[in-house]
């Protein structure tokens, strides 16, 4: 952990210390994501800490694809919200796209109701399609296999496994196939 004067604290204007090699819990995205290899700044005066995250747009897309491809359980409320926001849909537009009422979406997102099997798959399909449209490459080859791999009867899990990433992964994301 190296300490050198860097930029000023955005709260109090004090010099911050640069912190390297410390995992950063990226709570701001609403998911259980740990980032390694991120430069962080700590203010010894007011104890504020923040991170310098390169290309957040690409990071979020990487996380979204990761969830669609790797979550075997039904999507959790915060994952649904994350995916919706990453494709820039308001709750109402999202509801229209899925063919449900806005209140169904808000119940999924605040955890009052569980998303069901079909809508979980539809949501993932929409996300993967959207991400592919925004990319020069296919985001996900073998999409049929991806959905075949999901168990027929799925349960929501209490705590999804944390997602651990380094900038190398999302900055050089090659749009790899679902099944290499
Ligand atoms: Zn400060």
Image (cartoon, rainbow, N blue to C red):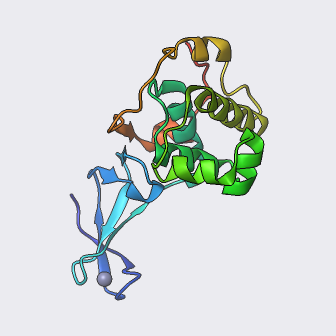
Q: Is residue 130 above or below residue 57?
A: above
Residue 55 visible at all:
no
**Quarter containing ligand 1?**
bottom left
Q: Nearer the viewer, residue 110 or 22?
A: 110
Report x, y in % for residue 178.
58, 19
Residue 176 visible at all:
yes
Q: Is residue 70 above or below residue 158?
A: above
Report x, y in % for residue 119.
63, 32
Left or right: 79 with respect to 43? right
Report x, y in % for residue 153.
47, 18
Report the quarter where the C terminus lies.
top right
Q: Residue at x 37, y 38 (%)?
A: 164
Report x, y in % for residue 32.
37, 46
Q: Residue at x 41, y 32 (%)?
A: 156
Left or right: 17 with respect to 143? left
Q: Residue at x 58, y 11 (%)?
A: 148
Q: Residue at x 51, y 17 (%)?
A: 150
Q: Quadrant of residue 14?
A: bottom left
């Amino acid at each position: 952990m190296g300490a050198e004067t860097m930029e000023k604290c955005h709260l109090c204007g004090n010099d911050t210390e640069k912190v390297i090699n410390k995992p950063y819990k990226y709570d701001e995205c609403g998911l259980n994501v740990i980032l390694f290899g991120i430069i962080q700044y700590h203010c010894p005066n007011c104890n504020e800490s923040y991170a310098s995250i390169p290309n957040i747009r690409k990071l979020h897309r990487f996380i979204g694809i990761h969830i669609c491809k790797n979550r075997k359980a039904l999507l959790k409320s915060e994952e649904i919200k994350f995916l919706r926001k990453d494709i820039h849909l308001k709750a109402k537009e999202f509801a229209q796209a899925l063919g449900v009422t806005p209140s169904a979406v808000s119940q999924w997102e605040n955890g009052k109701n569980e998303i069901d099997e079909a809508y979980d798959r539809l949501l993932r399909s929409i996300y993967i399609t959207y991400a592919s449209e925004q990319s020069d490459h296919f985001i996900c080859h073998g999409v049929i296999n991806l959905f075949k791999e999901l168990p027929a009867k799925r349960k929501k899990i209490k705590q999804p496994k944390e997602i651990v990433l380094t900038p190398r992964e999302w900055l050089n994301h090659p749009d790899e196939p679902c099944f290499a």
